[in-house]
Amino acid sequence: MNILLIEDDLQTASFIQKGLSESGHIADHAEDGEEGLQMALKNKYDVLVIDRMLPLRDGLSVIKEVRKQGIVTPVLILSALGEVDHRVEGLQAGGDDYLVKPYAFSELMARLQALMRRSQPAQEQSRLTVRDLEMNLIKHSVSRAGQVINLQPREFILLEQLMRHAGEVVTRTMLLEKVWGYHFDPQTNVVDVHISRLRSKIDREFDVALLHTIRGAGYSLYDPDEDGS
């Protein structure tokens, strides 16, 4: 999942970002409501996690403006205000779920996953396939020709991006943004290193290579038999 976290408590934000990263997800962070609103309007996210009490612009105001602009991305509200009236107000403002502080990270993850299941067709989120390579997005597993392939969280996200764009050229810049959350070129070979590791896991022991380098452009995951090459 690609998540936007709008949370002014830096310690809480750091904890959530670390947990999401370890679970194989990417979380951009905004420290105030105004910055968060601009990020939500500019970028595409799978879920928005918004603290209710924020500086510059409160969380409910952010949600209302996001909905006004036609963005239907699921929203999970975080708040220390847990009375029934508060929860109702949050949901009526356009939130999809409401989690009262303090909370367990496991519950936060479960609610995020539930929001994703409700917002996407089951068929779309179930699995991705290219030839005999299969990714199960529910079980968070990958196999090729029935053989289980163990991937690190970042490798899983990288492969997911390539499989979602199977047959297309995915640029290095696109991968830096989607997989590492960079909105600039940090002048690092991190993409090349991870591509090399991923290729060794999904191609090395098989007759047909699926992960291809497109010189001067990026990378592409495709079945060469279907491609006609």
Image (spheres, grey):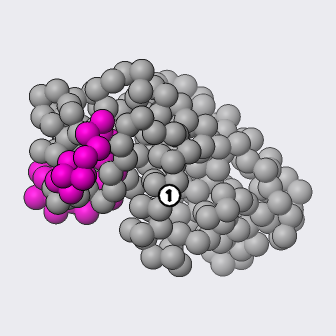
Q: Is residue 110 left or right of residue 95?
A: right
Q: Residue at x 47, y 67 (%)?
A: 117
Q: Is residue 147 left or right of residue 31?
A: right
Q: Residue at x 47, y 62 (%)?
A: 114
Magenta-colored span: 63-90
On the image, the x and y values in percent for residue 228 come to: 66, 77
Q: Is residue 201 left or right of residue 16?
A: right
Viewer-proximal residue, 120 or 173?
A: 120
On the image, the x and y values in percent for residue 22 come to: 61, 37
On the image, the x and y values in percent for residue 58 come to: 15, 37
Is 86 one of the magenta-colored residues?
Answer: yes
Viewer-proximal residue, 197 or 31?
A: 31
Mark yes or no: residue 183 visible.
no
Mark yes or no: residue 138 visible.
yes
Q: Residue at x 46, y 54 (%)?
A: 111
Give the residue at mark 1: 113
On the image, the x and y values in percent for residue 80 come to: 30, 36
Which residue is situated farthest in the front direction here?
Answer: 83
Relative to residue 222, is residue 193 depicted above or below? above
Q: Residue at x 30, y 59 (%)?
A: 96
Query: What is the crowding at mark 1: few (fewer than 14 residues within 10 Å), some, or many (at least 20)?
Result: some
Is 123 one of the magenta-colored residues?
Answer: no
Q: Quadrant of the C terminus?
A: bottom right
Going by the numbered disc 1, the residue's amino acid type is Gln
SS type, badge 1: helix
Quadrant location of residue 68? bottom left
